[in-house]
Amino acid sequence: MQATDDSGATMSMETLRAFNHCVLHLGRLARDCGAAEFIADGLQSFRQLVPFASAWWGEMSASVADAPPKSWMHGRINLPESFAAEWHQSAGSDKFSHDTLSQPGAVVRDSGFTDPDAQVDAFARRHDLYHPMCITFELPESGLMFFVCLYRGAGAPAFSDDEAQLFSAFCDHLLQLWRFQVQDMIRFDTGSGASDFGVARLDGRLLFVGATLCAAIQRELPGWSGSMLPAQVIAQLPTAPCVMRLGRCALTLSPNADQVILSLETQARGAVLAPRERTAAMLFAAGHSYKEIAKILTLSPATVRTYLRNCYLQLGVKSKVELGYVLRSPHASADATRRE
């Protein structure tokens, strides 16, 4: 028996059952393994349905007039650690990358070493990226693009139409579950979304990063190329919860199981908060309860209440929404927030 989709293509019931099993397994992974290995484990599961030789995924900024596309957070399967750095050297000339970034939500495929740029073609040959298949999605809350690329070598068949449809549907589920994980960890509920947040492993490898945080790190710590936090920030991870200066901003580091949540804030006008007060305020604005903050900061709930009471007085705010707005807005005042 076969099923027919809207495009007229057919898939066997066996394939559909295998896909359903893969998606159910993906849901279990999201619950059991956490964000650290979720995407890698999910793609390894999908590999049993749609075989591939290697894979690359992460968050990327699209090309603009004065800058080529850049991958800020990435993971890989069967590709060397230098893969992203090598790709960055010719990213502005990579036609395949341009095609997929310009068509969010669409699966883009190619076959052959056909890029007109010699450096891009050499890069593809070096890693045997003969058959690429890629999809990108817009991430409005982060200000970046999420991408997944699968590759097969020259000795393998091209990705078929059916495989492209399965890949598209699978990545819809993969992205949604990954976004849920990130949202649960950082609990963002402000108008700025998650562009000023990041999530990292304890070794400094990024699991999620927003465009505003990327820009601040790159501005204040020149030479940073993404994916792994700068050494200056990694050195502070074992001391979390803590606050470190990042130019005109403060970077709050908050522990969360095996990860650290990074949140960027600009000091509000005239307000002087102690580091622990600022950390408690950021956690409270992000949705954590008094008890949760007390556990994270190893404080008593009464001390947390005292910290937050002081923050409210210092910043002139009267609600959690106002608190989050003023902490993250360079020139915001509580009165202006109330008038909106």
Image (spheres, helix red, strand yellow):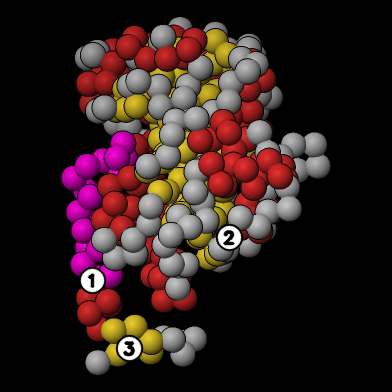
Does residue 136 appear to the left or right of 329 in the view shown?
left
Does the magenta-highlighted stretch encompass residue 37? yes
> Quick check: 2 left or right of 111?
left
How many residues crowd mark 3 within 10 Å: few (<14), some (14–19), many (20+)? Answer: few
CA–CA distance between discs 1 and 3?
A: 13 Å
Horizontal and vertical percent position of residue 210: 54, 36
Left or right? Give the position of 19 relative to 253.
left
Q: How many marks?
A: 3
Q: Between residue 183 and residue 66, name the one nearer to us.
A: 66
Front residue of 93 and 39: 93
Q: Residue furthest front?
A: 155
Above/below status of 253 relative to 192: above
Q: Residue at x 29, y 51 (%)?
A: 44
Q: Kindly identify the amino acid type of the residue bearing the numbered disc 3.
A: Ala
Where does the N terminus fall, quadrant-wise? Answer: bottom left
Lower position in the chain sequence, tag 1 or tag 3: 3
* Residue hosting label 2: 112
Residue picked out by circle 1 = 18
For the residue labelled by badge 1, is the local secondary structure a helix, a strand or a loop?
helix
What's under tag 2, amino acid-wise? Answer: Gly
Q: Tell me: residue 60, above or below residue 199.
A: below
Reading the image, the residue beneath label 3 is: 3
Give the answer, above or below, for where 196 lies relative to 275.
below
Nearer to the camera, 108 or 140 = 108
